[in-house]
Image (cartoon, rainbow, N blue to C red):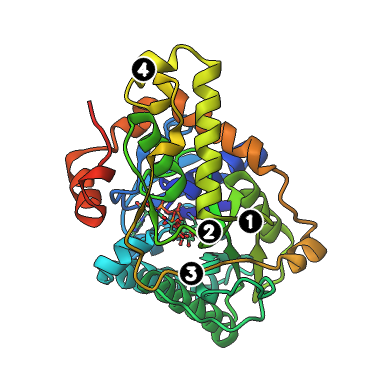
Amino acid sequence: MSNLLVTGGAGFIGSNFVHYWREHHPRDVVVVLDKLTYAGNLDNLASVNGESGFHFVHGDICDERLVLGLLREHSINTIVNFAAESHVDRSISGPDEFVQTNVIGTHALLKAARAVWLESDPPVHAHRFHQISTDEVFGSLGDSDPPVAETARYAPSSPYAASKAAADHLVSAYHRTYGLQTTISNCSNNFGPFHFPEKLIPLVIVNLLHGRAVPLYGDGRNVRDWLFVTDHCRGIERILQHGKSGSYYNIGGNNEWTNLDLVRKLCQLMDDAFAGDPLLCPRFPASPAAAGGTCASLISFVRDRPGHDFRYALDFSKCAAELDYSPRESIGVALSRTIQWYLDNEQWWRRLIDADYQAWVEQQYGAATRLASR
Ligand code: NAD
Ligand code: TDX
């Protein structure tokens, strides 16, 4: 039995992980520590909040004393660190918070873990610090480059990626220098329920429903590898259970798409959803699909993201061989399920489309891309 501290557990992947873990390990204790930034949302945890064995703590990972107290109070033996500023575009317009949370915050967690697990009397021998990292730390690939393995050099492009790379180096240093038991996973672009609608897939879904332009950066030829969030959670579970301390593991999706092809696929799936459900037309009358048109008419090319990485792709053969990991979800089915989740949970994303957020999106990409509100 484990007692987990899940930092950033009210965000997109963290909350999916909490649900996954509670379902598969119901006897474990799960403590979520989350600052509830714009990206953190207690609604994501509504179905578990108040249950026995689950605790939510509103706080900052940079607060080392708070973390020390939580590790002791709940006899935590596993930390899974999802907490981060996670949006590349925001890191370009304001990098400071990325350094603060992603670097200083991870270091505060490491210091607390070292104090409680290694320096207390008696030390906690069976412990694990797991860091959630990203494919972005490896930098951009060309069209014909092979997918990157764990041994590839870190070459981050954006302030976001650089802050994640710095955090990973600190985690690795705490393993080599102090003997902290650590693992790091680098994963591809996730998608699925509870994804904040500033990231490509949920932004496209919400804009299509409102007849708003879908902004594709540059020529739309950049490539991302897509991973359904539940596959990611299963990969993390394997690493926590069987991963070797001090190791890095790639969790890939084997699902490379150009942004343009992915958005076209989403448009097609949305057209199909409207064709199959007459109730969607009165709910979302501004969508082109409501008037028998096609959602693809909303695709619009906008100025490129500065330093936009061309392609990411992960070689996850180590995870497959050592941990028997492979992604299970097919992209078509998983995208349809994701669209359906957004259709079924309109209240969830409506609340997020507030004035502050709209102002930020508009400032970044122009009025045409602004999300609609009621
Ligand atoms: P997210 O932005 O949806 O969630 C981040 C969460 O961290 C939020 O709940 C936020 O409130 C919380 N948080 C932020 N600063 C905090 C602080 N100082 N103290 C405590 N909590 C804080 O992010 P996500 O997409 O769920 O990503 C989770 C992790 O996975 C991140 O570390 C990210 O770098 C990594 N990752 C994400 C993807 C992806 O496709 N989304 C891919 C690879 C890696
Ligand atoms: O409006 C958009 N238009 C567009 O063309 C947005 C939001 C994105 N894009 C492009 C940029 C990327 O090539 O789509 C691709 C995906 O963009 P994001 O959803 O912003 O994700 P990305 O920048 O690839 O980073 C994501 O995956 C790696 C997560 O946000 C990171 O946290 C993670 O580390």
Kindly check if marks 2 and 1 are in contact, taking CB atoms under 8 A apart as contact.
Answer: yes
Q: Which residue is mark 1?
A: 236
Q: Position of residue 289 (x, y in %)?
A: 44, 25
Question: At label 3, which amino acid type do we have?
Answer: Ala
Q: Secondary structure at mark 4?
A: helix
Is 48 left or right of 197, judged from the image as shown? Answer: right
338 left or right of 284?
right
- Taking depth in this image into account, of 242 and 286 the one nearest to the observer is 286
Secondary structure beneath dot 2 equals strand
Residue 327 visible, this angle: yes
Mark 3 or mark 1, whichever is nearer to me: 1
What's the CA distance linking mark 2 and mark 3?
12 Å
The residue drawn where x is 65% and y is 48% is: 231
User: In terms of image quadrants, where is residue 315?
Assistant: bottom right
User: For the residues carrying marks 2 and 1, which lies nearer the camera in this image?
Assistant: 1
**Which residue does the numbered mark 4 point to in the structure image?**
283
Which residue is denoted by mark 2 in the rendering? 80
The answer to whether residue 249 is above or below residue 283 is below
Dot 1 amino acid type: Ile
In this view of the protein, can residue 26 be seen by the observer?
no
C-alpha distance separating marks 3 and 1:
19 Å
Nearer the N terminus, badge 4 or badge 1?
A: 1
Q: Residue at x 56, y 41 (%)?
A: 265
Crowding near the residue tagged with mark 2, few <14, some 14–19, many ≥20 C-alpha atoms within 10 Å: many
**Real-space Cα distance between discs 2 and 1?**
9 Å
Foreground tag (4 vs 1): 4
Point out the tag, 4 or 3, that comes first from the N-terminus: 3
